[in-house]
Amino acid sequence: MARIEEVTDSDIAEVERSAADFELVDEATRPLRAFLDLVQARPWLGTLSNIETRALNAVLDGLLGNPVALAAGSEAPRGPAAHRDAAARLLPRARALANDRRFLHWQVAFPGVWTDWEQAAPPGGFDAVIGNPPYVRQEAIREQKPSLAAYRAYDGAADLYVYFVERALSLLRPGGRLAFVLTNKWLKAAYAERLRGLLAEHAWVEDVTDFGHARGFFADADVMPCVVTVRRPDPALDAPEEATVAAIPAAEVGYGGLEAQVGAARFALPRLRLGQEAWVLEPPEVLALLDKLERAGRPLREYVGRAPHYGIKTGFNEAFVVDQATRNVLVGEDPRSAELIRPFLRGQDVGRWAAEWAGEWMIFARHGTCIEKYPAILRHLGAFRTRLEPRPAGWRPTAAHRTWPGRKPGSYKWFELQDNVAYWQAFARPKIIYQVIQFHPSYCLDRDGHLSNDKTFFIPSADPWLLACLNSPLMWWRNWRRLPHLKDEALSPMGFLMEQVPIPDPPAERAEVTAAVEALVTARQDAGETRRALARWYRHEWGIERPPGALLNPFSLDADGFTAELRRALPRARRLSAGELDAAAREHAASVAPMALRLAQGRRHERRLATLVEQAYGLTEADRALILRTAPPRMPLVG
């Protein structure tokens, strides 16, 4: 290998000499590689019986013959019959696995990089490891998880790239550097908690640059790229106290002058800030304000007394979610069906302050439901039975059936919801619902006992002050920096993350808060009803089946603007008579203008609530100026 490394391959003779030397290296290391393949294959062999486990250990311990020869297949196992026969079955499987997986043994492949191989941590390693590891979600690597569990950064929900980072770090010499392009999810994702802890404890983080959901780097991939550079600690050097970081919003990334832009955006951050918890790449003054907010309130779970609850996952919505017409048929056939059919909200129905129900219903057949009492619902669900059956334990694909046609394994019956929903009674009580993926700060009060799907969470509380805090601009500012970012810079307020949101004690003006929240909730509910009424008016009076957005949400239009939008939605040849123009003006005056006034009053309520929230957190004028200067996209009441 030393000769190969010295040859430049500048002519045919040198290339041939390198090839010949590679063959010598391959021949010399083949037995060792075969033995290491056997060791490496162990986690990939799946669950072994006790006799198989003992047989494999006997092979590795040299009790059934020469371990290297047995691994290479040049010698048959000998010894007690049970162990010998088990080893004879296992060894070909291990060799086939090694051939299929192409295990790489770094020290054998690069023997000049390490010395004293017999040590647990051989000296040496690469000067640098750079790359863009594959991003593969945990659902696609289920078969590999048993072998990946040996990694210190292992998490059952971790993306594959997490393990590439740990492996790369282990391949560095002391003082060597790792530089990877990664998706930025690892900065805050729960599955990367151990990875962040590993880098904090066993590496020196030197630089992190986050580009958000910048699409221009990889034309064929929709990712959220960040670049991280870390160094393996060198005992001969002093550990740095700071790292440089930069967070550039996707919309501001300048691909032409990227180096200069990143250089201008960088700032120093104490390395102690980059620990196992989510990494927040913000300047010290922003971090200080975030810390101030945390100290000013109690965690939401403590404030409410309970954690947020996840919405319902049916496993097959086509069967369990029905429209109004289907509900009418089921209840008409058997009035008892109404006991199981409940109004249902989807994630997209959840708005700011209030939800807008789309007229959908859920068959709430929770675990333990006596479905025979509801023959109409049993008939309805029976039409989907094949798709509803839970996959039996031990089911394996066959040539005829490569995938299970029904739902995932579980203790539920075919006609029951996939989720047990142990907290089902809480749905009937007033609560705050929010979306799993938040593009806007939208927390709504539900007092109508709606069920909601798995694109939502709900907080078992109807506290107006809590709702005011969650919908406040300050909370969006805080959550933008604390919560993981998803596609298009949406936030992921998963329940376990929301548990830690700090909620301050209510102010003395609690009655004012209650009145303002009530006005906002009822105004948004009435605005939804007005939109539905207008949609019916457009359809019946004007023949407009699909009104454009400006007509569906016309509350920023004056009478002339409303009439102009109405004319645009009609065929070009259609001319409005004086009477029709008058009818449009009357409708605007009767429904649009009053609702627009209430919504304008609602904005004044929101601003007052925002002020009360800021005061409850103890914000100063300097704090407010910082928040405005660093306002994230889509922060309410800004601009």
Image (cartoon, rainbow, N blue to C red):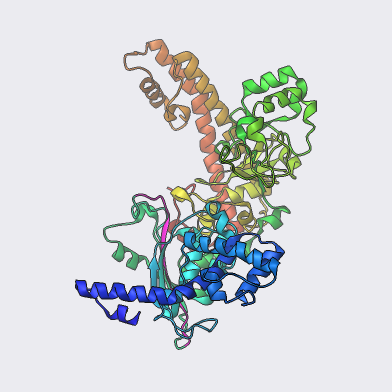
Q: Residue lying at the far bottom in this picture: please name it.
A: 236
Q: Is residue 411 left or right of residue 310?
A: right
- Residue 319: x %, y % from top left: 64, 30
Which residues make up the magenta segment? 220-235
Q: Is residue 499 left or right of residue 164?
A: right
Residue depicted at x 65% and y 50%: 466
- Residue 99: x %, y % from top left: 47, 62
- Residue 394: x %, y % from top left: 68, 47
Whether residue 336 is visible here, answered yes or no, is yes
Q: Is residue 465 left or right of residue 10?
A: right
- Quarter of the image with the N terminus is bottom left
Q: Residue lying at the far left in this picture: please name it.
A: 11
Q: How many marks?
A: 0
Q: Is residue 5 left or right of residue 502?
A: left
Whether residue 292 is visible here, answered yes or no, is no
Q: Observer-nearest residue: 634 or 595?
A: 634
Q: Quadrant of residue 197?
A: bottom right
Q: Is residue 417 above or below residue 530?
A: below
- Residue 340: x %, y % from top left: 74, 30
Residue depicted at x 41% and y 66%: 180
Q: Observer-nearest residue: 62 or 173?
A: 62
Q: Is residue 456 above or below residue 44?
A: above
Q: Is residue 416 above or below residue 223?
A: above
Q: Is residue 60 magenta?
A: no
Q: Is residue 569 above or below residue 261?
A: above
Q: Observer-nearest residue: 577 or 355?
A: 355
